[in-house]
Amino acid sequence: MIARRFLVRLAAGAAAMLALGGQTPMTRPGDAAPKAVTLVAREFLYEPPEATAKAGDVTFVVKNAGAIEHNFVLQDAAQKKIAEIAVIEPGATAEVNGTVAPGTYLIVCSLPGHRQAGMIATLKVAQ
Amino acid sequence: MREEFRDEREYAHARADEWLWARAKATGLSRRRLLGLLAAGAGAAGAAAAELGRLARGRTARAAPATDLVVKPTPPEWFNDFGSNKEMRWEVMYNRGYEVPNELFFVRDHSRTARVDQDTWRLRVEGSAVAQPQEFTYEDILGLPSVSVMRFVECAGNGRSFYEAGYGKRAQGGQWKLGAIGVAEWTGVPLREVLDRCGLQRTARDVMPEGVDELKVRRPMPVSKAIADDTLLVYAMNGQILPPDHGFPLRVLVPGWVGVANIKWVGRIEVSDEPLYSAWNTDNYVLIGPDYAPDPPSKGPRLTAQVVKSAFELAWDAEVKAGRRLLRGRSWSGQGKITKVEISINNGKTWQPANLREPNIALAWVRWDLVWNATPGRYGLIARAIDERGNTQPLRVPFNEQGYLYGGIVSHPVNVT
């Protein structure tokens, strides 16, 4: 997990370097946007409330900065589940991969009452 | 224990009286004033309780900062810490009385303990199956007829960690051992009394209490359970004003049922002539797994009564000195009185009956003991109980994703030196 998180960070950093004109063997042409979406969950919201990603394979990295359990469910416009992290303990960071097409998705915490209390965010996916 | 106290009703009445006297003394209410209230006729005990309730004000002012997850101190000698959930360590119950004292009682909060101002708090009863929807103040509730009962409250997921031990697969949720249970004497108003005052209709089907906590935790029960004699709106626990972590000012007691049904900080009750659902009986607190079929709109069978369990009053991975030792523990069932408990000190090879101690109250628990001539070595101690309906503790329980109702036998590790 730590190694994967490190790679995610490295990839994000590499993408940033590319955007600044740098070169690195970890990037490919067209990799200008990061392929990781990082979210923070707490009582009772996600930050940022509006996330963005590019179409394709995306790694969702979710940190629970709250004091109680939360989770992460990514749904498409038809409410079909695209990706899920069943439980994220307080203080823990977990990640999951999902493939997304251009459009708008919902991110919710599916633990009872959490969504209604405000744990809902959107993910906008660009081409 | 006085002989007549073996009758649960006698015991409950006597304890309710004792509670009133003790509260009166503790809060400075004169004996004459209390007698006056008691002599005033119907509802007098409630009026006396109301007086005590008024005197209890200021309690919330001394509470922990509202940012803390729970209010009461939960030192590691008494509790295993799971954030907003605190598991009682069983060794603290060794040689204790029947009830779990309030300060040792486990805490299971879905978010954090709600801090409720009793002056502005109201209980609203409404829905399609009550003719006169009404609001009740705290003092209205204290003025209604009350009873006291001994019952357990137990988290639906108590014992969840043993699914991982048995299946190598971790169920979702706090990894309790067996300490997410407690027995207390609960004092309050039968829910039926409140429903009747709101004109409960014959067409009523489901009753759903809802908390005023930040998640508005709510879960329905059938009207037949809601009007049972011992289904209560509770305002006192073990003779003390209900503590914030346990639902102050008012919680529901639904005897025998999974903990989540016993809604804390209740502020609203919906009574409907249609079936009611919430996320707490459709998505969670249902059995999801290969052995359970979905039960729309729920993802699996909805949990109601608890299963049979047993626990030793010992630390987990206990260290015991060799010699003649008295093993002690408790067994309980959500479906009736425990009739027999057997103990194995050799991981299930041989069994011997434990001595059951009075009182043995249905939907509470029974204490038991057994003399053990402990010789040095590693042991797996197992207790296995059976209730009056023949429910017992199997070797294995089918896995469910959220890890509820672990009613299987548990091997308790003990090292004798």
Image: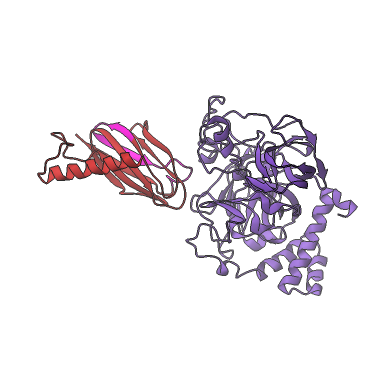
Chain colours: A red, B purple
Queried whether the magenta region covers residue B105, the answer comes back as no
Q: Image quadrant of residue B385?
A: top right
- B343 with respect to B219 (left or right): right
Residue at 85 percent across and 48 percent down: it is B7
Relative vertical location of residue A69 with respect to residue A84 in this rendering, above or below = below
**Near-viewer residue (B61 or B291):** B291
Where does residue B156 sit, x and y in percent of width and height? 60, 41
Queried whether the magenta region covers residue A102, the answer comes back as yes
Q: Residue furthest right?
A: B3
Q: Is residue B390 visible?
A: yes
- B15 with respect to B254 (left or right): right
Residue at 81 percent across and 43 percent down: it is B356
Quadrant position of the N terminus of chain B in the picture: bottom right
Q: Residue furthest left?
A: A21
Where does residue B266 sit, x and y in percent of width and height? 59, 53
Where does residue B366 sit, x and y in percent of width and height? 77, 44
**Near-viewer residue (A126 or B209):** A126
Q: Which residues are magenta?
A: A97-116
